[in-house]
Amino acid sequence: MPDIIRFHRISHRYEDGDDILTDLNFSLDRGEMAFITGPSGAGKSTLLKLIGLIVRPSRGDVVVNGRNLVELKRRQIALYRRQIGMIFQNSNLLVSRNVFDNVALPLLIRGHSGGDIGRRVHAALDAVGLLGRERAFPPTLSGGEQQRVGIARAVVARPALLLADEPTGNLDPQIAAEVMQLFMRFNQVGTSVLVATHALGLIQHLPYRVLRLEHGHLSEGLPLSAGATGTDGDTPLESPAE
Amino acid sequence: MRARQNKPQAARAASDSPPSWLPRLLQDHVRALSGTLARMRAKPLGTLLTVIVLGITLALPAGLQALFANLSDTGYRLGQQSLQTTLFLKDSVDPAQGRTLAAQIGKRAGIVSSRYLSKAGALKEFEAHSSPGETQALKLLDRNPLPASIVVAPDPHQPQAKAQALLKSLAELPQVDQAQLDREWLQKLYALLNLIGRVMLIVMAVLAASVVIVVANTIRLDIENRRDEIEVMKLVGASDAYVRRPLLYTGLCYGLAGALLALILVKLAVLSLQGTVQHLAGLYDAQAHLQSLSLGPSLILLGCGLGLGWIGAFWTVSRHLHLIEPH
């Protein structure tokens, strides 16, 4: 299966001179779902930002969907970002716009017609269990609802790749488990998903690849202690096969 | 959670794709304009204050333009009337020849009147308008030194250059010794009007710059207030052009609204001054009617408002928008 993301000898250095990623090689197959774990400050968010072209690598190549992001010009970034969906810990919703308008934003930017936007937004909200909350404004929603609105916005344009940076970081274990189930469902319909998370307890029993990022290097598998302790006290999820 | 297993699949099912580029471009512009108007409506006080500042700033040059147009009109009308010229005849021209020549001149195209003034008549007019000392001095001479003349008044409605050419040709007639075209005061008036026009241009340029700065600053604050929104928009794939478009429309709307307000202010000012000016003119046995901005200058004012608003918006957007990126 061809890969949708490929890192080739990626290194990244912060402006203050600290190396965060060192000579990293990594790939995600098309239709695959994987988790990236690691301690705070290990570079998980930076790795996702490299894929979202929020930062550019100091060295190496990032190839997404066959395009080397290092070669993309500034004016091409917007078009590229339309191919991916991004979800963040704080959900990044626009507080002055209601749920419908927040979710519709990627479709408006892509120039979809009003009728098409309505259909797709309702489908996305239905998928995340928020149908009927279209007119609510983000400050009136719970943390879990806000995160689900963020997920609906990320998937409404049906991106080939979904990136999530600590999507369950602010959520209680029950809601976190529901959010993680959503990612699994989107993956089941063919979306490639890459999730950076601390919540080892949530993912330890799932049949997905787990990559550990530490000291600038990636390695396969959970840390040895995770399975024994149920790290972070998260509710373990059932495997989709179960 | 109400989400069902098959829903994401349904969401991914085929649906309409974005329209082709032209309908999409038009749709984007309509959305940007309607979004801009909605945002301006959402902040009525701020919008109103900005429009008032722009309206007053644009009303000043527009009012000056109206004033200048009225002054010029009056000046040129007076100028045309003062084109009256005196042709001093040679001593060899007798009164009969002088009257015949005056009649011939009076029949020429572009001449309203032509009046012969004999040497005796000239002496009488001199005595009527001179002091007793001057009259006595003249009587000491053994003969009347004043020449016979023909006073010619050209049609004031013809172009000034044409009237001057006509009078020049009369001055070159063989019977004419000298022609007196007393337009010194008129030249002063035209010089004054020219000066006022140039000062007005400078004032207009300064006020136009003020409009650009006011719009630019308003848009800059708008960008700062919407920094998070712009970051999120760029994060989900908005191009610079997409983000820029509503901000440019904001500048255009402010400029147009300011120009409309300026137009109204100038019309009101002209209406309120009309009575006073007519009263003043009546005291000088004259008639005066203040003209407001006509259609042409009004359209120019609206165009300037739009243009300056756009320039202000484009200037600030170009400087600030590229600095806002997701982080």
Image (tube, grey):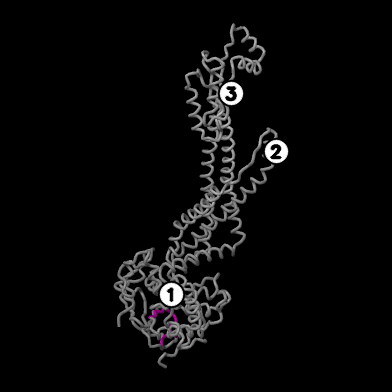
Amino acid of disc 2:
His
Q: Viewer-nearest of labels 2 and 1?
A: 2
Whether residue B135 sits left or right of residue B101 in the image: it is right
Which residue matches tag 3?
B115
Given the image, what chain letter belongs to the residue carrying mark 1?
A
Amino acid of disc 3:
Arg
Q: Which residues are magenta?
A: A192-204
The number of numbered discs placed on residues in the rendered structure image is: 3
Q: Quadrant of residue A224?
A: bottom left
Q: Residue at x 51, y 48 (%)?
A: B209
Q: Secondary structure at mark 1?
A: strand
Earlier in the chain: of badge 2 and badge 3, it is 3
Q: Is any part of residue A33 visible from this angle? A: yes
Q: Secondary structure at mark 2?
A: helix
> In the image, residue A175 lies at what x, y percent?
51, 83
> In the image, residue A188 lies at what x, y percent?
40, 86
Which residue matches tag 2?
B279
Asked whether A41 or A242 is in front, the reply is A242
Q: Viewer-nearest of labels 3 and 1?
A: 3
Mark pair 3, 1: CA separation: 94 Å
> In the image, residue B41 lies at what x, y percent?
59, 63
Q: Residues within 10 Å of mark 1 (few under 14, many from 20)?
A: many
